[in-house]
Amino acid sequence: MLGVLCIGSLSVIQADNGAKGKKSTSTLHEGIDTTYAGFRDLFISTSSNSTNGARLNPRAINFVQDYIVKNGKELQEMKDWGRPYFNLIDGILIQYGLPRELKYLAVIESNLKPTSISWAGAVGPWQLMPGTARILGLRVSRKHDERTSYYKSTHAAAKYLRDLYDELGDWLLVIAAYNGGTAHVYNAIKKSHSRDFWDLQYYLPAESRNHVKKFIGTHYIFEGQGGVTTLTKDEATQQLSGSAMYVFTRKLSKNELANAKTISISGKYHSLIIAKYVLMDIAEFSRYNPDFDKVMASSNNTYDLQLPQEKMDLFAANKYQILNESVQLLLNEDAADTSQKTFGEVAKKR
């Protein structure tokens, strides 16, 4: 999961949250094992522990180790009591074509508390400032503050995250900007001459720098591995399979996104069959859903299908017929491949 290096041999930058003495590997593992099972493997260096190929950047390991030991038990408990809220947030993030793992931003922002208030005046599970909330369409007044609504504030946060990603194109930079604003991110890019978070991090305010690392640590606690939102764009391109990379190549206008609907599907669906039933040209379908067949043929065959609203209605109405025909098409393709191989082998023997 963390590449090919043993943790004991890594030399990494110490966490910025008030330097503690570095824990020994054995002490860390004892803490992990006795607090919550399964995280010993998180820091063992076999990439086979990860189902998607994502590896933790060596410059984050010390911070994430300490964060998991300190917060793992509390956040594991949140998995249970927070499930209804996570389900609601998942559904909304999917509607905006965003990775569902961004829900962990609400965990580090507010501990999922709708009444959370920061010293700066940010409120709600997504900790939105009054001005930002109003721009995003929320009512904010003394009598009524929609920032405390899980449903409405998540829609607002999703719009904001979508716009930040459209601007910055890198999820780690998005999380830094969500915390401290885009001006700090652009200033760090200018001073570091880099758009790589790990190179520019020390030109960011400490709070924003550590916010990103807290998000990564929270992701590892909940998911047991990294993902597209815990990597820089270059890292994701190098490490992740097609099952995650389509989020970088889905290019739709704001109007198209606003009129689109997204649902998560899994199974043996095929793009040609879906396009036929929803009356779309295959090129247009692929623009909304890049690498669809590649992802569905992978071991992690789950895809956030995105279509114009009226096309999604057609998909929903014909879902079972689409699946049946897709399976039949794939079976026919497999049979054709087998026949070709057999013919080739016979021809060689002659």
Image: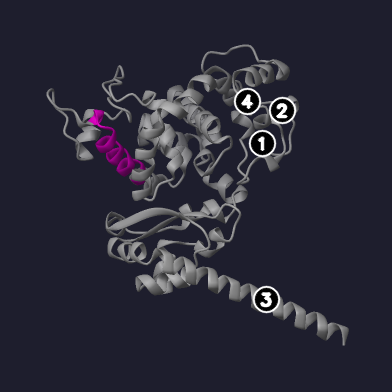
How many other residues sit within 10 Å of disc 4, few (<14), some (14-19) or many (≥20)?
few
Q: Which residue is mark 2?
A: 7
Residues packed near mark 3 inside 10 Å, few (<14), some (14 to 19) or many (20 plus)? few
Q: Residue at x 47, y 66 (%)?
A: 323
Bounds of the magenta segment: 147-162
Mark 3, secondary structure of its residue: helix
Residue 156 forms part of the magenta stretch: yes
Residue at left 41%, top 71%? 275
Q: Nearer the viewer, residue 40 or 45?
A: 40
Which of marks 1 and 2 precedes in the sequence? 1
Amino acid type of the residue that numbered disc 1 sits on in the rendered structure: Leu
Disc 2 residue crowd, few under 14, some 14–19, many 20+, Cα 10 Å: some
Q: Residue at x 21, y 39 (%)?
A: 135
Q: Secondary structure at mark 1?
A: loop
- Which image quadrant: the C terminus? bottom right
Image color mode? one colour
231 up-or-down from 81: above or below: below
Q: Amino acid at mark 3?
A: Asp
Mark 4, residue position: 37
* Mark 1 neighbour class, 10 Å CA radius: few under 14, some 14 to 19, many 20 or more: many
Q: CA distance from mark 3 to mark 4?
A: 44 Å
Q: Tell whether label 4 touches label 3 (CB within 8 Å).
A: no
Q: Count the numbered circles shown.
A: 4
Question: Mark 3 touching mark 2, by CB under 8 A?
Answer: no
Q: Mark 1 sits on what residue? A: 2
What whole-number distance in Å separates the C-alpha atoms at marks 2 and 4?
A: 19 Å
Q: How far apart are the two marked residues, 2 and 1, measured between alpha carbons?
A: 9 Å
Q: Identify residue for label 3.
A: 337
Of the image marks 3 and 4, the number of the one nearer the N terminus: 4
Answer with left or right where residue 343 lies relative to residue 78: right
Q: Is-magenta flag for residue 7?
A: no
| Marks 2, 4: nearer the viewer | 4
